[in-house]
Image (spheres, helix red, strand yellow):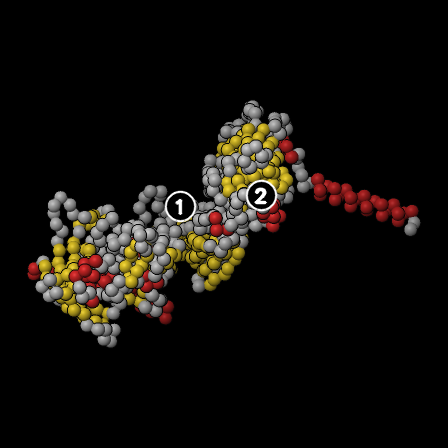
Amino acid sequence: MTMKGAVLSLFFVICFVVILSLGVSAQTTCSSSQVIMRLSGSTNAHGEVWNGGGGYTTEICYDTIFGSSYSGQNPHACASSNKVVRLSTLTNAHAEIPGNNNYGTEVCYGDLSCTSVAGNAPCPSGKTEIVSLSSSTNAHLGVAGSYNGAGNYKICCSRGIIPSLPSPQIFNATWNRFDGSRIASDAFVCPNSSAIMSVQTKDIFDGSSIQFQLYDKDPFPNPDDLIGSALTTIVRNGRANFTLNLSNPVLLDQLRTELGRTLEEKELELYFKSDSSSISNVSYVVRYDGNVSSCTYSKPAAKIYAPVHRGVYFANTNINFVSGCSSQIGPSKSDWIVTQNGNEFTETGAQFEHDFANAGQVNVKLKCTDPRGSSISTESQMLVVSADKRVLAFIEKPSLDEFVYNSPPSRGPYFPETVRFSALDSFVVEVNPNNNNCLVTCLGGYCPQMTNNSLSNCAGGTGGPVPIVNAPSSGSVADYKNLFFNWTFWDRNWDNQWTSFEGLDKKEGAILYDDLSNQINDKHMSVSINYVNGVNATFKRDFTLGRCLNSGNTYYGPNSQPLSTNLPNDACKGGDDAAGTGDDCCSVGFQCLPSGDSKPYSCQLTTGATRCEDFDNKMDCASNNDSRIPRASYGQSPPECTFLECFWDTGSNSCGVKATQYSSGANGCKIVGGGVNPPVCSWTTHQTECLSGKKTISYAVVNGGDRCNRNSVEVLCGSLNFELSFFGKSQFIISALSIATLYFVFSVYRRKRYDQKKR
């Protein structure tokens, strides 16, 4: 190589190194002590704390913004006045303004005093914008000036007096489950779970190291045994946590060795000591015996942080999905099912983004499963919009997988059959294409006041939320008069439609069943909501009526856990925890009785009767506690607050049915007091066998006189009865005529539109 070539080569190498070094130095704009927080980019970014693990390179620097360095101690320690923003997590986080309390990770810095203002408003005098947010919560972040629309927010800060920090403290050492709930003193911790050693700190800045040491408490005078080596973690937001993974083979071996150290020791008494510099704190004792069955846990919890329920999002924009699954045992699995316009896709994981190409309502279901396989689901309904009108239809009552159950009074009638239904969360909006698709108007229903995002040309070019014009203000009543609700009800399967109810503004009501559920989610309803000009949307809901299922063999408790009624566990007593009160749960012919010597109750075989007339002696007739037997003899759904029971008629020497009418009120059925007896009717009955799916029940009055006369009733075997509890007869006739007139007007309108198109 010639000298000239060598010089040129060296020149290019030097240039390459200089360019590379410039690129590297651009990644860090200030020293770590001056970093307030970091962003993943200059706009539409996620955030992290100053020392987060995301490796974000866009730094918000104190000395760059204010022109001089902060010289105080522990700049990232939180004081009462130096909060900047709150983050959803330590890294890869969404943000909210400092005045909100939805997120637990606080970003604080030195002597700053910060406030939030609307994106299109100036910072208060003396304050400087340091970061901007797309909305007040669940927000993307950007550098100063990135989000300046009406629905955006600026974080404006000023320098103040360097706070004086008192002596650091460690206190309140507790044992917690994985979801943060407290493990009580002397409670068990078990294998195949997680236990968190936790302490609170004060005046110890974030990032400081805390050591935890795990001990087994031994009887005096023996010294307590240290288990394993010291465990180190760091302080985050005034707390230090270390998670013990009780599925870890190394830790399990250490605990097993400690258990086997002496033959007398059947369980360990565990506590921990936390240390930082010269200060420490000691926890209370929890127990460990190596048995999984020593612990009980609640079901996991499910929450959808984003998209928000009833949120309005624009098509062809990135929409963030964030899971809020939590569990007492360990990390939960998040499974998503997202459905729009009949098209479904699935995702797994705590967070993802999706871009919807088409407008239409979107149902989002999230299933959270803990490490033992227990799961729970939740849902949200959002509306994706474009330059047209769109309807969001949603049934919030009954809710997802709900057990509709009305607790009975301590004595007297039990009526779980009435189901309230409601679609109050529904609404219709219009996006005006003549305003660059930035003008959104509420046309009816419970519209939110703001969209959750917009197109990139809206909200001052930020794509942030925009107002929804004419949306009902907070606390006001929504207007549904332009929405036509068509309710349809099914039983057992979606092919067995049995009644419907429809009309303008019919957003809620009640339906009366005479048939409780026998399987989970075997009752169904749907609502189709039509705006007056033809746009519509439909929503379907499954639910369970009652908690006594599987032909009385299974009772689902308040936490929806299945319990066998045939075992001595008191499950057969039903929701009021009392046998013989009308909501007992047993198979026909069985009765909820003590399992000998007043032990827990279970379902036990009695007479095998299915109707009152099946009882052939006074004792069995009078002692019946199965509410389904007198209901089968009565033949219809009884009037509200009517208590049915079997009674023995001495005249005919047979078992009949008796109806006692209790008073009703806003708080349910009431027992008549003050010496006033409630009205009573009683009959002996005769039922034919089922023929072609029908049976006939005839009644002979025993007590009550002429007012108790009843005609024979022909019913479908296993039929349902529908009651418009919010209508009288005249209102029903008027409504039917109104609906017929409305359909006629719609038909004429559609015909005219059709003729116009043909021309």
Callout 1: SS: loop
Q: Nearer the viewer's eye, disc 2 or disc 1?
A: 2
Quadrant of image for the C terminus:
bottom left
Q: Position of residue 318 (x, y in %)?
A: 52, 52
What residue is at 44 percent from the left and 54 percent from the top? 376
Separation of disc 2 and disc 1 at Cα? 67 Å
Marker disc for residue 240: none
Q: Is residue 316 visible?
A: no
What residue is at 26 percent from the left and 62 percent from the top? 606
Q: Is residue 751 visible?
A: yes
Is 5 placed left or right of 677 in the picture? right
| Residue that label 1 marks | 449
Q: Position of residue 3 (x, y in %)?
A: 91, 47
Callout 2: few (<14), some (14-19), or many (20+) C-alpha neighbours within 10 Å? few
| Residue that label 2 marks | 262
Is 130 placed left or right of 313 in the picture? right
What residue is at 49 percent from the left and 56 percent from the top? 373
